[in-house]
Image (cartoon, rainbow, N blue to C red):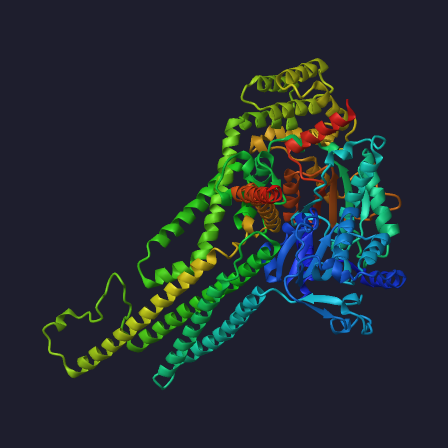
Amino acid sequence: MATRNRTLIYKRYRDALKTVRVPTSTSPLQSSGKSSCSGPVIELVNSSLLNPNRNYAPLSTEDPGNSRGAVTVGLPPAWVDVSEEIATNVQRARTKMAELARAHAKALMPSFGDGKEDQHAIESLTQEITNILKRSEKRLQQLSAAGPSEDSNVRKNVQRSLATDLQNLSMELRKKQSTYLKRLRQQKEGQDGVDLEMNLNGGRSIMEDDDLDDMVFNEHQMAKLKKSEAFTVEREREIQQVVESVNELAQIMKDLSVLVIDQGTIVDRIDYNIQNVATTVDEGLKQLQKAERTQKKGGMVMCATVLVIMCFVMLVLLILKEIIF
Amino acid sequence: MVLVTAARDYINRMLQDISGMKVLILDSQTVSAVSVVYSQSELLQKEVFLVELVDSIYKSKESMSHLKAVYFLRPSSENIQHLRRQLANPRFGEYHLFFSNMLKDTQIHILADSDEQEVVQQVQEFYADFVAVEPYHFTLNIPSNHLYMLPAVVDPSSLQHFCDRVVDGIAAVFLALKRRPVIRYQRTSDIAKRIAQETAKLMYQQESGLFDFRRTEISPLLLILDRRDDPVTPLLNQWTYQAMVHELIGIQDNKVDLRSIGDFPKDQQEVVLSSEQDTFFKANMYENFGDIGMNIKRMVDEFQQVAKSNQSIQTIEDMARFVENYPEYKKMHGNVSKHVTLVTEMSKMVEERKLMLVSETEQELACNGGQGAAFEAVTNLLNNENVSDIDRLRLVMLYALRYEKDSPVQLMQLFNKLASRSAKYKPGLVQFLLKQAGVDKRTGDLYGNRDFMNIARNMARGLKGVENVYTQHQPLLFQTMESIIKGRLRDVDYPFLGNHFQQGRPQDVIIFIVGGTTYEESRSVALENANNSGIRFILGGSVILNSKRYAMNHYKLFLILGV
């Protein structure tokens, strides 16, 4: 695809025009300062810091507001800190997910030890990631802003973008967990040859031999029984964990799903969003105007004016009384 | 993927080198060009957190200097004025200006003059000056499309404006594809010739450096046609999915606005019909209405199965699976309800307006012979109370186009009957259409009754019988494409411009129809491309027509010329 860069010509024109332009007395900053800046403004006079291609403009000894070649970089509003915090959390969660994947792989490898430390590591990692996601999701709610304005649209969009990231991470975590559990289960079944699946509905007992009812347990069977019991307990614990994590995940996904854009729908269209911005800003303006009018017409204002007039009248009468009598 | 990919590449390049939070500012034309190829979620991934129109950006005065502004505008004088004002009072930290077509030096001068605070970092030309609705179909969304029929003497400046926009659009397509074409045009059309000449001047003289690409063996072909050569296709009622939706409801930039035909819940008022994002639509957009019905039923059954399995949650695994698959399920649900709504509404309209009956006669008028029978059928339909005004007008127009020379008495009878039924369609309107697109003005063999080969072919087809009465019409474009494939496009009818010449068959052909394309024609192009004949066709037009818009074009011109 062909493109054409006109920056060079443009800059040449701009520099040429700069030299012939009569320097005005009012600084350009002051004229734009009429617009309400949302935060303190940092003046960067040495523009070469920003753009190495620029010519170095000598520091002027006069008021920085008058220098021409300066770029004003405003401090971003406070909510940007929140969004950056969430973004770093997302990044941290990602690195931890990579760690988790490695821990899963390690735990699945056949080893001589008990594997308990691996389990602990996995549990703690999973817990950490879930906590990060939950915290980030709560912080995300803080980004919502009331009132139609450009800033609130930016916030809404930042919110949506972070919500998509969080949702994707939650789903990834869930998938990793389920594949790990599945593999673990396969391994354990392979070891014992005992079918360990338990249904919520069923509660199929592990011991399928019914004729154990009146048999004497010999030692071998006792050992087997104890082992199965241990596995049962552990299975229950695992299931409990899965239930908890599924619950948490469901909660996160429910909260996020209102924010995330469904791809391919009308909400994902740029022109639809522009229309909505225009209408909400217009409506906001109308609401403000209406509020202004009702306030002006408000009874309070009437009362106040009447009272003030009365006061004046009384004062005049008082003075007259003093003069005449 | 050709046009869509080109537009997307341009936008990707615009955004990729600029770091940090950005605001994207578009104008009313570029917003269409961007919206059909790029989604809001993709913009968010590129850290574009605000999108605004250039003319509404005044409404707020808050300074957002933590954002970097990326402008993507057409280089029109209004946009330059907007930019001047905004550069004089900059609200954003940095300004990156991208224009969708070539800037004049004076315009760069004006911008440089107003940029006192030197906030502009770059000024580039990225030629995404077309709306790529499909991979092989683009439009320019020109507002006053009817101007193409205006004689030059009436309003030369408006006509020049129209031609400039078309030339800009065509040039942008070729710059995006990095090719320079050989140009042919339809002999009988003045405006086609004019556009061909101006395009050639731009590509070969004025900006020959910009268009000087690495020459491949065979240059692509640009063929410029006039809508008036095939006035029948836009007037016909359509029965394939995409064309039908546009005909009955209306598609604009791949969006369908259902609010005009009824009340719907908020999330179904406007829907997106894009073959890039909707696999069901991609598979069904060129299918017949009957087949679509069956396919939708199958889709609904599949969905119901999924929904049922979601409801029976018995194990932990089921619960986990449900939570995992919920986004997919939601998407499927949205898609199914969109298509079901569209097909339901269209069925209702077909029933109300008795379109099956009307369309049968239309297809007869367009394809087969029999003047007497046609006259009777049209008269009956004109007398039928259920037929709407626009359908009556269409029938009379189609009859007039076909039988303008046979039996003028009967033709006059039809005109009068139409006028008595619908007062605003005076007899002059249809006669006006005949003057514009009558048999004397046309180049192509629209009804296949000039060329002996065509007559023979038609007779054979009549004997064989047609598969489906309602879709038997083939647009004239189909024949034109066939001629190009066989290398037999007649020089007499479609001459080369100036000293252009082409040996052998081109591999890429871009057909531009001045006055607008139709979805029936884009379907023809897509099916032809799927045949792998060795030639890749791309279709473009000034707008995308349906019968209402086409009739409205004529009506507007009719009023202007005061005929």
Q: Residue at x 18, y 79 (%)?
A: A221
Frontmost residue, B367 versus A256: A256
User: Which corner quadrant of the image does residue B470 belong to?
Assistant: top right
Q: Position of residue B162 (x, y in %)?
A: 78, 40
Frontmost residue, B230 versus A10: A10
Q: Position of residue B153 (x, y in %)?
A: 85, 31
Quadrant location of the C terminus of chain B in the rendered image: top right
Up-down relation of residue B104 to residue A111 (above or below):
above
Residue B555 can be seen, yes or no? yes
Q: Position of residue A118 (x, y in %)?
A: 39, 81
User: Which corner quadrant of the image does residue B116 belong to?
Assistant: bottom right
Up-down relation of residue B432 to residue A231 (above or below):
above
Frontmost residue, B261 versus B505: B261
Q: How many marks?
A: 0
Q: Farthest residue toward the left?
A: A214
- Left or right: A137, with B85 as reference point: left
Q: Residue at x 72, y 18 (%)?
A: B406
Residue B505 can be seen, yes or no? no
Q: Position of residue B380 (x, y in %)?
A: 58, 17
- Left or right: B77, with B521 as reference point: right
Q: Residue at x 62, y 23 (%)?
A: B392
Q: Farthest residue toward the bottom?
A: A112
Up-down relation of residue B246 to residue B113 (above or below):
above
